[in-house]
Image: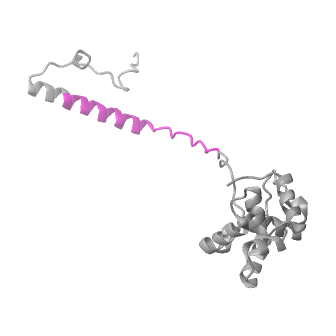
Amino acid sequence: MAKYDYDFKKLVVEAYQQGKGGYGTLARHYGIPADSTVHKWVKIVEKLGFDALHRRKNNQIYSFQFKQDVIHYYLTSGDSYLDAALRYGLSSGALLQRWHQLFLREGMEGLLPKRKGRPSMTKKKQTPKKRATREQELERENELLRAELAFIKKLRALGMTIPDRLKSETHESSTNSEKSSD
C-alpha cells in the first residue's frame, strides 16, 4: 500500500472540491490505484478538516469505553466503517474494522487494553535448603556404601579387576572420622 504525503492528499481533495473530476477521474489523473482512496480522503476532510490528512506519528491509546461506544454505534447504525469512524473522530475505518473483528472473535474482552512488552521479572523466593538431619546423612552414607559394596561384589563375580580407589578395605565413615582419644 502506497503512502502519500499531506501535500499530495490536500492537492487531490482540493481538485475534487473545485469540481475538476470525480473520484475515479482524479485517481487515474494522479496515479492512485483505487478511487476509494480519493473518496476516503474527501470524506475525512469533510468531517474532520485538512489536518486529519496528516499521518499520525504515534499510536493513540483509546479507552475500553470509547471502543465500546464506537462498536455499538457501528452495529446499530448500519454505517460503513469509515463513516462510523469519522463520526467519532477516527481518521481510519481500518481501526474500527480491527476492533469489530476483535469484538466478533473475543467479545467485549477483546477490546480491553492489552499489556505490551516483555513481562517484568518476578523475583523467586529462595527457599533455604533444608539441612539434612544427622540421621538422614548417615542413611545416605549407608546407601552409598551398600551400593559400592554390591558393585565390588559384582566385579569380583565377573572376574574383573577392581579399581584402586575401591580396593581399600577400610572405608572411613563419618562415625570413624572423628576418633576420640581416651
User: Residue, x 40% and y 21% (percent of image)?
Assistant: 178
| Location of residue 44 with respect to 151 vertically, above or below | below
Q: Which of the 4 image quarters holds residue 100?
A: bottom right
Q: Position of residue 179 (x, y in %)?
A: 39, 19
Regarding residue 63, the answer to whether it shows in the image is no
Residue 165 as seen in the image, left or right of residue 134: left
Rendered position, 71 above or below 119: below
Picture residue at 83% right of the left edge, 57% below the top: 9
- Identify the image quadrant of the C terminus: top left
Residue under the point 59% across and 42% down: 126
> Where is residue 172 drawn, in percent x and y?
32, 21
Asked which colour scheme the image uses, the reply is one colour
| Count of marks placed on residues | 0
Give x and y (percent) for residue 132: 46, 38
What span is in magenta?
122-151
Q: Is residue 145 magenta?
A: yes
154 within the magenta span: no
Looking at the rendering, which quadrant does residue 146 occupy? top left
Foreground residue, 76 or 34?
34
**Relative image position of residue 6 (x, y in whole percent):** 84, 53
Q: Nearer the viewer, residue 86 or 14?
A: 14
Tell me the residue at 75%/62% (across/down): 27
